[in-house]
Image (cartoon, rainbow, N blue to C red):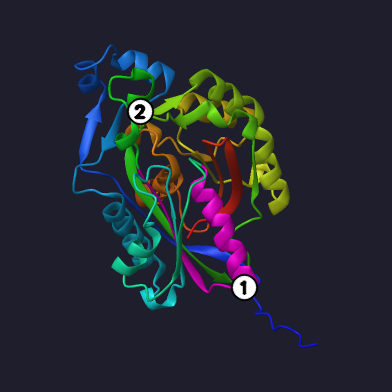
Amino acid sequence: MTTLQQRQGAPGARILGIGGYRPRRRVTNHELAQVMDTNDEWIQSRVGIAERRWAGEDETLVEMAVAAGGKAIAASGLDPDEIDMVIAASASLRHPIPGIGPQVGYRLGIRRPGAFDLNAGCAGFCYSLGLANDAIRAGSVRNALIVGVERLTDVTDMTDRATAVIFADGAGAAVVGASDEPGIGPVAWGSDGDQHNAIEIVAGTGFMAMAGQAVYRWATTKLTETLVEAMERAGVGPEDIDVFAPHQANLRIVESMVKKLGLPERTVIARDIVQSGNTSAASIPLALSALLESGEAKSGDLALVLGYGAGLTFAGQVLRLP
């Protein structure tokens, strides 16, 4: 019997470059108060958002993904020809066919990559990161581009203050490549499908609906154990974490997790939600790119990330910043 050959993968993988794209239009809480029953104090006290970005007609999912992906490739130092997988993580595609992954790869000059879309809600970037890490270690891929991109305003009812004040648009990307020393820890992921309708696009309306209190309770009571598991799998503890960048869903959730984890005072905490709102699968790479650009985080820092959202899905990793 003929034995099938297998490729030999790299010892590990790491992020080589990160990039982000934020739409041009800034929407403040005061602007929203002109068209719905809300105000700045109400919004900031509940979710911590001061402003968010909404995409214009020309800022499509593909255009934003290409902008963020181009920055990530430039930061990585790689040529597009050296990338052979593209994952586009998004929960806001209005048309499922064709997917945007192949379009993004083509627009960026990546020649015939394995390319696909992934929908794990707000956990999409972390799911993609786990898949890219495993593919490189298995030898299926040399280098991968992963993009989290959302136009949540397309699926948001602008008369519903429970969602309209929260959701926003944007894209964040990372290039992942082989490394002799692992720079991405094992993923700790899972789902709680019994709560699958806690966040959903309601049939017949096309708009997002969210059981806000249920999601808040789930995130603040169930997900700290996932963060602890991610650290344990990577062989590190809270005292080793330089940057904490969870999904930017609600500032109160971020602060609750910080308190429960007992992170040291020196740890840099991502609070990108204050200026960007909830950008779902784009929120973690957007937050990391902002911290690196501002100098609050630096190359080589150890970051703890956690994506969570619709499904309900969740995924956490420890990673070394590029």
In the rendered structure, which amino acid carries the disc numbered 1?
A: Asp
Residue at horizontal 36 percent and vertical 29 percent from the top: 207
* Left or right of residue 87: residue 141: right
Relative to 254, residue 171 above or below: below
> Based on the displayed image, in which of its 4 quarters is residue 181 positioned?
bottom right
Give the percent coordinates (x, y) of residue 158.
28, 24
Q: Is residue 153 visible?
A: yes
Residue at horizontal 25 percent and vertical 44 percent from the top: 23
Relative to 128, residue 114 above or below: below
Is-magenta flag for residue 67? no
Disc number for residue 229: none
Camera-nearest residue between 269 and 211: 211
How far separated are the C-alphas under marks 2 and 1?
Answer: 50 Å
* Foreground: disc 2 or disc 1: 2
In the rendered structure, which amino acid carries the disc numbered 2?
A: Thr
For the residues bearing labels 2 and 1, Cβ distance under 8 angstroms: no
In terms of secondary structure, where does tag 2 sit? loop
Q: Is residue 223 visible?
A: no
Relative to 202, residue 15 above or below: below
Disc number for residue 205: 2
Disc number for residue 180: 1
Give the percent coordinates (x, y) of residue 226.
66, 39
Dot 2: few (<14), some (14–19), or many (≥20) neighbours within 10 Å? few
